[in-house]
Amino acid sequence: MRALTALYAREWRTARRIGGGASVGAVFFLILVAMMPFALGPDLRLLAKLGPAILWIAALLSTLLGLDRLFQADAEDGSLDLICHASAPLEAIVLVKCAAHWTTSILPLVVAAPLFGLMLAMDGPALGLTTLTLLAGTPALTMIGAIGAALTASLRRGGLLMAVLVLPLAIPVLIFGVAAASAASGGLVPFATPFAVLTGLTLFTLAAAPFACAAAIRGVRE
């Protein structure tokens, strides 16, 4: 447990120091949200109706930032070999690295989502539900992205390939996240049903993705 705690602290410091951490994701998130009113026009009702989908798409694309370096940097400097031979299980190490990435890069976006939602003329209930769905669903996006990062860890420029692998797998999370977030603005289904499925997807990825990532890393090293 002490080794995993030290690994989390190392990943947290590295994420804050390299690549801008949360600031790059927040700026990218802000740019995407700010461009939508210019593309869709000044219709406030339309912006409010599409607001949850816009925030979710922005969160999905922002999640991909920095994920390609999740294991690639360790593969380049040889740390990945040491990690694979560590006393802690490789699956637990993967989970800790994903938790550090989510905490430093994704959680600030979730906190800032209500502020960005105001730019889309979303009301209070819609902002609250959208933020709740992002909090519940973005860990699944991180874990799915980690699988793509593990598969492309040995590639020097595997960012595009990782996105191609990850985006189709993230579609179910996006569908149920938007459906739950849209419940406050006249969605087709009540909030509880898609939110329960979204939470289930997150729990499933938290349980399954570390094993998939560990298998991919072992395959890359071979």
Image (cartoon, rainbow, N blue to C red):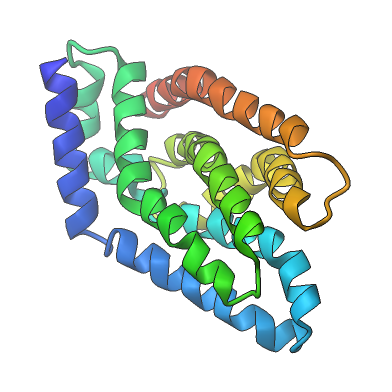
| Residue 176 located left or right of residue 187 | left
Whether residue 53 is situated above or below residue 76 in the rendered picture: below
Q: Residue furthest right?
A: 188
The residue under the point 45% across, 41% down is: 149
Q: Position of residue 157 (x, y in %)?
A: 42, 56
The residue under the point 44% across, 22% down is: 210
Q: Nearer the viewer, residue 45 or 213?
A: 45
- Count of numbered circles on the image: 0
Q: Nearer the viewer, residue 18 or 183?
A: 183
The residue under the point 35% across, 27% down is: 94
Q: Nearer the viewer, residue 98 or 202?
A: 202
| Residue 108 located left or right of residue 209 | left
| Residue 100 located left or right of residue 68 | left
Q: Position of residue 44 (x, y in %)?
A: 74, 80
Q: Nearer the viewer, residue 125 or 100?
A: 125
Residue 157 appears in view:
no
Q: Which picture quadrant has residue 78?
A: top left
Residue 80 appears in view:
yes
Q: Position of residue 18 (x, y in %)?
A: 22, 59
What quarter of the picture does the N terminus occupy? top left
Q: Position of residue 148 (x, y in %)?
A: 51, 39
Q: Which picture quadrant has residue 96?
A: top left
Q: Residue furthest front?
A: 124
| Residue 135 located left or right of residue 133 | left
The residue under the point 47% across, 40% down is: 142
What quarter of the picture does the C terminus occupy? top left
